[in-house]
Amino acid sequence: MTAARSFDDRLDTYLDILLKLGLNLQPDQALLIDAGIADIEDMAPVVRLLARKAYTLGARHVFVDWSDAQLERTRLLAESEGALSEVPMWQIHWLEELGEQGAAFLSLYAPDPHLNDGIDPARLTISQRARMQAGAKVAAAAAALRHPWLVGSLATRAWARSVYPDKPEAEAITALWDYIFMSTRVNEPDPLAAWRTHLDTLNKRVTYLNAANFRYLHYHAPGTDLQLQLPGLQEWVGGGNSVSAQGIPFVPNLPTEEVFCAPYRAGVDGVVTSTLPLNYNGQLVEGIRIRFENGRIVEYGATKGREALEEIIETDEGSHYLGEVALVTVDSPVNTGTPVLNTLFDENASCHLAIGRAYPINVHGGASMSQEELAAHGLNYSLAHVDFMVGSDQLDIDGETASGARQPILRGGKWVAQ
Ligand code: ZN
Ligand code: ZN
């Protein structure tokens, strides 16, 4: 007979997975925890446990970038438009400095899908653009893997209420933690061994895709008929095999189920329809439909939250193009058939595309290329990088080589390529 594991025990395992597998935190390395977008009361207990554990693992310093969802909402409602467009650079400089020093960055991402209900979308846009512009260097350093980073999550009251509206709050939080633990393999008898096996599976898919050297991917599903060209010198990357500039292997998202690449900027044609709601900046966007010509978005709409979609696409010229194509099999443990309104999980339950910036690592030698060199290889640049979900059990994807030979990669949403 085995006793059921306590919540505290499972939480401890989860935090171990974040720090040891996700960030691969090194002795003497600094850790920055970004505790953002949720209520501080929900964040604080987990952040304190993480800090204690990080010091046990030998962290030199643990810094916390605190914020609070309620204070952020107050700010968005109260500040003048001029003030909303200002980001004090001291808020950015310490992040740049820590990144240059090779600190590990952990973002705890648990946004309330209804946080910004009732706030004028134009005001959200002003604030969001200012943040993206001020943080462009920080985002580019992370995208080029200059230091290890990880996006993880935790259950919060507001998020749990949105996912399980019919459950009492305590039950909803328990259900959300159960989902987080299940999707990050915490319940496995040996979670780190289960992760190694899973990352091997993702690496096999990467090896297959790089060897196949497809020129095009073809997407077919209800509402979707898309042809997507790849850059030619593309490097598919598994969600689990990143290596920082210091040579530290890390897993930038937990959970992770994806293998991803960059599309050729001018090589996307056809129509794609989203299959799961997107929680963007506290606004829900559903039923996204986008038409592309020569890579550029020429028409778009959404059945709900069109203003938020417009905010994303109209960020700059680069946000009219795609920067990421990611393949996820529908039979991943993250996919329970119900979206949880948090992109970190929903994108790992579903094939997705990203509007905006490409990852330099998706072209051979890209991590050391300038923005101009990346553009010459067909990689897109934008201040924005926003994933939206297009996978379902009705999605078929074929790869087509330069000679025109086609091979099935996904059938009915399931990975079939060998
Ligand atoms: Zn992705
Ligand atoms: Zn992405």
Image: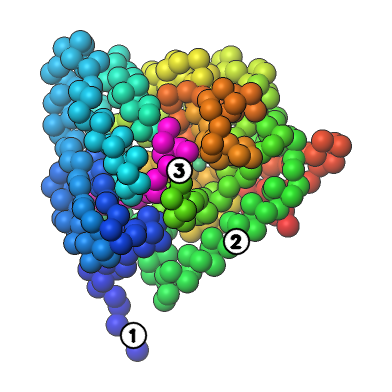
Q: Residue at x 64, y 40 (%)?
A: 364
Q: Is residue 365 left or right of residue 189?
A: right
Residue 91 numbered mark, or none: none
Q: Is residue 13 left or right of residue 318?
A: left
Q: Quarter of the image containing the C terminus? A: bottom right
Q: Is residue 342 above or below residue 269?
A: below
At x 21%, y 52%, the residue is 62
- Check disc 1: other Cα within 10 Å, few if <14, some if 14-19, many if 20+: few
Q: Dot 3 corresponds to which residue?
A: 145
Residue 14's quadrant in the figure? Answer: bottom left
**Count the marks: how many?**
3
Identify the secondary structure beneath mark 2. Answer: helix
Percent x, y of residue 351: 56, 43
Picture coordinates of residue 243 (x, y %)?
49, 51
Quarter of the image where the N terminus is located:
bottom left
Q: Is mark 2 within 8 Å of ligand 1?
A: no
Magenta stretch in the rendered image: 140-157
Q: Amino acid at mark 3?
A: Leu
Q: Is residue 388 left or right of residue 123?
A: right
Q: Nearer the viewer, mark 1 or mark 2?
A: 2
- Say which label, 1 or 3, has the lower sequence index: 1
Front-most of residues 57 and 34? 57
User: Which circle's residue, 1 or 2, is located before the other in the chain?
Assistant: 1
Q: Is residue 22 above or below residue 111?
A: below
Q: Is residue 264 above or below residue 330?
A: above
Tell me the crowding category of disc 3: few under 14, some 14 to 19, or many 20 or more residues within 10 angstroms, Cα based. Answer: many
Q: Which residue type carries mark 1?
A: Thr
Q: Is residue 219 above or below residue 247?
A: above
Provide the residue designation for mark 2.
201
Provide the residue designation for mark 1: 2
Which residue type does callout 2 highlight?
A: Thr
